[in-house]
């Protein structure tokens, strides 16, 4: 038996396991967007929900129990580069944000911050601006930006939306 077989790697927790206060989250931000970088810090727009996909909240990847920084960034579109903004869950919750797991096929450790949604973006711009600014302050309190890293996911699966569930209710051959 080799040395690595003697010390098994701990199993990854279930994707729907509660998000603990001692966890960190990674927010993936395109280098091209310039919403996060090592010289200038973070722009509030780094936390802007997408217009259609972020109905349940903005997406984050959970820490090393689920993803290395490279794995979290790899969930972004192939051919693009990404920074990761590191945000402690305890700081998010202390600021009043709700952090929940939201399992998505092909995205281990996917979590969301519930207050920032595409619905709030569409209906209440002032509230969205307040929330993005507050989240920026939380992230910059202990500023840590990792990367850049390469995305490695095909465009159609690099979104925040889970893939559709096939409809198997119709009879075969019809």
Image (spheres, rainbow, N blue to C red):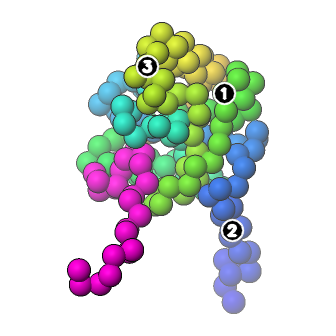
Q: Residue at x 55, y 46 (%)?
A: 61
On the question of residue 82 being in view, the answer is yes
Q: Is residue 58 above or below residue 35?
A: below
Q: Front-most of 87 and 125?
A: 125
Crowding at label 3, few (<14), some or many (≥20) Cα neighbours within 10 Å?
few
Crowding at label 2, few (<14), some or many (≥20) Cα neighbours within 10 Å?
few
Number of the front mark, 1 or 2: 1
Instruction: Please identify the quadrant where the N terminus is shown.
Output: bottom right
Label 1 or label 2, whichever comes before in sequence order: 2
* Boundaries of the magenta span: 149-174
Number of the front mark, 2 or 3: 3
Q: Front-most of 102 and 39?
A: 102
The quarter of the displayed image where residue 153 is located: bottom left
Q: Is residue 18 above or below residue 97?
A: below
Q: Position of residue 53 (x, y in %)?
A: 40, 40
Instruction: For marks 3 and 1, give the CA distance.
Output: 19 Å
Q: Which residue is mark 2?
A: 11
- 98 left or right of 106 in image: right
Label 2 or label 3, whichever comes before in sequence order: 2
Q: Which residue is mark 1?
A: 97
Label 3 or label 1, whichever comes before in sequence order: 1
* Residue at the bottom extreme, as displayed: 1
Label placed on residue 123: 3
Q: Residue at x 47, y 37 (%)?
A: 55
Instruction: For marks 2 and 3, give the CA distance.
Output: 42 Å
Give the secondary structure at mark 3. helix
Q: Residue at x 35, y 24 (%)?
A: 34
């Amino acid at each position: 038996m080799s040395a690595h077989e003697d010390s098994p790697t701990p199993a990854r927790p279930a994707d729907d396991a509660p998000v603990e206060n001692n966890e960190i989250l990674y927010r993936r931000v395109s280098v091209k967007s310039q919403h996060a970088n090592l010289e200038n810090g973070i722009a509030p727009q780094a936390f802007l929900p997408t217009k259609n996909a972020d109905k349940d909240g903005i997406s984050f990847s959970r820490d090393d129990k689920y993803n290395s920084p490279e794995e979290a960034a790899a969930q972004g579109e192939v051919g693009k580069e990404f920074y990761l903004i590191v945000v402690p869950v305890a700081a998010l919750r202390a600021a009043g944000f709700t952090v929940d797991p939201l399992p998505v096929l092909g995205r281990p450790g996917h979590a969301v911050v519930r207050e920032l949604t595409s619905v709030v973006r569409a209906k209440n711009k002032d509230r969205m601006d307040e929330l993005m600014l507050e989240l920026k302050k939380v992230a910059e309190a202990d500023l840590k930006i990792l990367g850049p890293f390469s995305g490695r996911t095909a465009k159609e699966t690099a979104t925040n939306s889970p893939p559709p569930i096939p409809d198997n209710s119709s009879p075969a051959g019809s």
